[in-house]
């Protein structure tokens, strides 16, 4: 007999060392995350230090001597140019920096917005260092929060490299301790969970900037004024990188609505660069210098306009963050399921141990077999707090996005120009959001329910053998007026239908073990049941799964019911004199 870990339906010695090549490959993989994260931590940290130093500088009064947007060309053609001088504090100083942070405005609108607080001739506050440096704005304090994002990559890289080269724990005799069942797979599941959450988070941030915000701007522009604009500049801006060259249009235009000349270089709300020069060339040819074209102007903000306020061909980029979000969420869900299941199996093995021969037939039919001798307290498939937290996250995420569009619809009705298309379009999304709110309330109330405790004579009963169960409730069990405990066998199959993947689930076995109506009888009890001889044992493969589970349902009047599921591993009948 020897210690074995069980994976993929076969025995593998747990003390087999990870090869040097594997360690080097893993080190390179995690080293990439560490290097990228460290590089951005350095850049952001340097910017943060420069920004925070300005809070120690003296505040002065300054006069703005120059304030204009200059077109310099290049990949970011527009720059906000400002010049100012001090009016107090003795010696006159001059400066030309809005802040210590390197400004990259890009568009005319961004540069004009940056200059808006500093019109020509205005007296404004400025900040002076002891060494003579002068700026108009102090650094943003949120730079310290931004640095936390690349720190995630640093943590992933550092932890991964340490894990690659960490020595296996030794026993009292100096020999490597055997790895228990599910330990390695559990770590892989947890890693997948965090990687999935990371990519999903990146997808959410990208979706806001590449999808949600442009769509909100597009909806808001439906109430903008139509004006005649004159094109002052029209060209294509090329962005060179290691991945190739991308292009975007640069069209500068002006208009006058009675309060001075205003300018903008925004063509559409779905901006950015993309491959393909021909489409951009057609846009530039349609907007030659000197041409009079229609533009949509924000009635409330100066130098804010757009030439094309609807969807453009560049809007397809929204699929990129959606794909990242979907892939990240899927990986996180799968990783969480693997980590939770393997952690549960690992704990059971640590309590009961596993000593199986290399040719034990159970290794061929049960990839995740874990023997647990003696009585064992069963663990629920999911926790109440976990379900509650998941529902809260879904509610905030869904309703947060929907609320932005609801606000636009509300403003359209308040202005007297009701947008009925948007209103009716939002109805099903509102209903889903209300459903999430109801789910959160239901899950919150369920937190106060009495908690069932189930103790079985074994975690891994054998077909044809006796399953003994004891149960009780922690908490105010008198609230329960009906209890039902059932044993179920579930078959799940995943298969391809054309290009689609389908998963079917079927309950092939169900037996009610306990069913009582009296409150006094719902406090605790015991039940025994003989498992069927010819049913299918627990099984798991890439596309098929047979699982057994105990379900307990306690009905509570005028309150959410108690509903919990407890997984079991049912072993096949064995020909060893009735002994396992």
Image: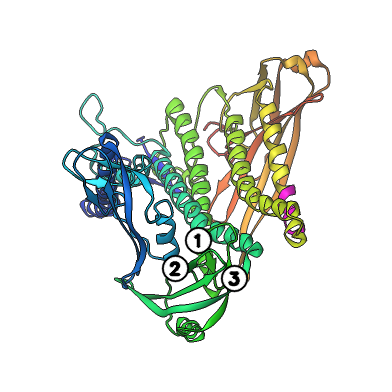
| On-image quarter of the N terminus | top left
Return the residue nearer the eye: 301 or 558. Answer: 301
Q: Residues within 10 Å of mark 1 (few under 14, many from 20)?
A: many
Q: Residue at x 67, y 35 (%)?
A: 440
Secondary element at image label 1: helix
**Distance of label 2 from label 1 (alpha carbons):** 9 Å
Which residue is under mark 3?
A: 311
Which residue is under mark 2?
A: 272
Q: Which residues are magenta?
A: 424-431
Secondary element at image label 2: loop
**Residue 34 image position (x, y, % from top left):** 27, 48
Badge 1 or badge 3: first in the primary sequence: 1
Residue 186 covered by magenta stretch: no
**Distance of label 3 from label 2 (alpha carbons):** 14 Å
Badge 2 or badge 1: first in the primary sequence: 1
Secondary element at image label 3: loop
Image disc number at residue 210: 1
| 544 vs 16: above or below | below
Question: Most prominent secondary structure in the magenta stretch?
Answer: helix
**Residue 6 image position (x, y, % from top left):** 42, 43
In which image quadrant can residue 212 be found? bottom right
Q: Residues within 10 Å of mark 2 (few under 14, many from 20)?
A: some
**Residue 304 image position (x, y, % from top left):** 52, 63
Horizontal side, residue 517 vs residue 434: left or right: right
Q: Residues within 10 Å of mark 3 (few under 14, many from 20)?
A: some
Badge 3 or badge 2: first in the primary sequence: 2
Residue 427 covered by magenta stretch: yes
Return the residue nearer the eye: 94 or 244. Answer: 94
Q: Are marks 2 and 1 in contact (CB under 8 Å)?
A: yes
Q: Are marks 1 and 3 in contact (CB under 8 Å)?
A: no
């Amino acid at each position: 007999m020897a210690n074995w870990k069980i994976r993929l339906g076969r025995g593998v010695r747990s003390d087999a060392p990870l090869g040097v090549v594997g360690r080097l490959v893993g080190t390179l993989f995690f080293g990439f995350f560490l290097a990228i994260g460290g590089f951005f931590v350095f850049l952001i940290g340097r910017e943060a230090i420069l920004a925070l130093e300005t809070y120690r500088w003296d505040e002065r009064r300054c006069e703005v001597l120059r304030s204009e947007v200059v077109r310099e060309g290049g990949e970011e053609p527009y720059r906000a140019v400002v010049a100012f001088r001090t009016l107090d504090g003795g010696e006159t100083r001059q400066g030309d920096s809005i802040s210590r942070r390197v400004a990259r405005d890009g568009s005319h609108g961004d540069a004009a917005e940056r200059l808006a607080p500093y019109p020509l001739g205005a007296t404004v506050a400025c900040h002076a260092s002891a060494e003579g440096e002068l700026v108009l704005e102090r650094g943003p304090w949120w730079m310290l929060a931004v640095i936390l994002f690349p720190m995630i990559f640093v943590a992933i890289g550092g932890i991964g490299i340490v894990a690659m080269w960490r020595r296996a724990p030794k026993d009292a005799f100096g020999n490597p301790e055997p790895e228990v069942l599910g330990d390695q797979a559990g770590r892989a599941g947890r890693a997948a969970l965090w990687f999935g959450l990371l990519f999903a988070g990146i997808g959410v941030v990208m979706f806001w900037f590449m999808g949600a915000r442009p769509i909100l701007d597009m909806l808001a522009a439906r109430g903008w004024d139509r004006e005649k604009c004159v094109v002052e500049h029209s060209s294509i801006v090329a962005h060179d990188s290691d991945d190739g060259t991308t292009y975007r249009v640069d069209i500068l235009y002006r208009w006058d609505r009675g309060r001075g000349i205003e300018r903008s270089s925004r063509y559409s709300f779905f901006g950015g660069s993309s491959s393909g020069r021909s489409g951009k060339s057609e846009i530039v040819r349609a907007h030659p210098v000197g041409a009079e074209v229609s533009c949509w102007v924000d009635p409330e903000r100066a130098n804010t306009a757009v030439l094309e306020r609807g969807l453009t061909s560049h809007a397809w980029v929204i699929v990129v963050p959606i794909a990242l979000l979907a892939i990240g969420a899927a990986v996180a869900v799968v990783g969480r399921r693997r980590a939770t299941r393997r952690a549960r199996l690992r704990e059971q093995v640590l309590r009961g141990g596993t000593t199986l021969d290399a040719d034990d037939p159970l290794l061929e039919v049960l990839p995740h077999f874990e023997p647990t001798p003696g009585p064992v307290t069963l663990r629920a498939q999911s926790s109440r707090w976990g379900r509650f937290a998941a529902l809260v996250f879904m509610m905030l995420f869904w309703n947060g996005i929907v609320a932005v569009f609801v606000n636009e619809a509300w403003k359209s009705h308040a202005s007297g120009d009701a947008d009925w298309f948007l209103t009716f379009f939002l109805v099903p999304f509102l209903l889903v959001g209300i459903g999430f709110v109801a789910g959160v309330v239901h899950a919150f109330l369920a937190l106060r329910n009495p908690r069932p405790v189930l103790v079985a004579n074994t975690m891994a009963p054998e077909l044809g053998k006796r399953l003994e169960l004891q149960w009780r409730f922690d908490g105010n069990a008198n609230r329960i007026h009906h209890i039902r405990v059932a044993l179920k066998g579930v078959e799940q199959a995943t298969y391809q239908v054309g290009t689609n993947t389908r998963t079917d689930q079927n309950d092939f076995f169900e037996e009610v073990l306990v069913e009582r109506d009296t409150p006094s009888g719902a406090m605790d009890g015991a039940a025994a049941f003989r498992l069927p001889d010819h049913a299918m044992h627990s099984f798991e493969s890439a596309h098929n799964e047979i699982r057994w589970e105990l379900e307990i349902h306690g009905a509570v009047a005028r309150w959410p019911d108690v509903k919990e599921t407890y997984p079991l591993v049912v072993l096949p009948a064995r020909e060893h004199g009735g002994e396992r």
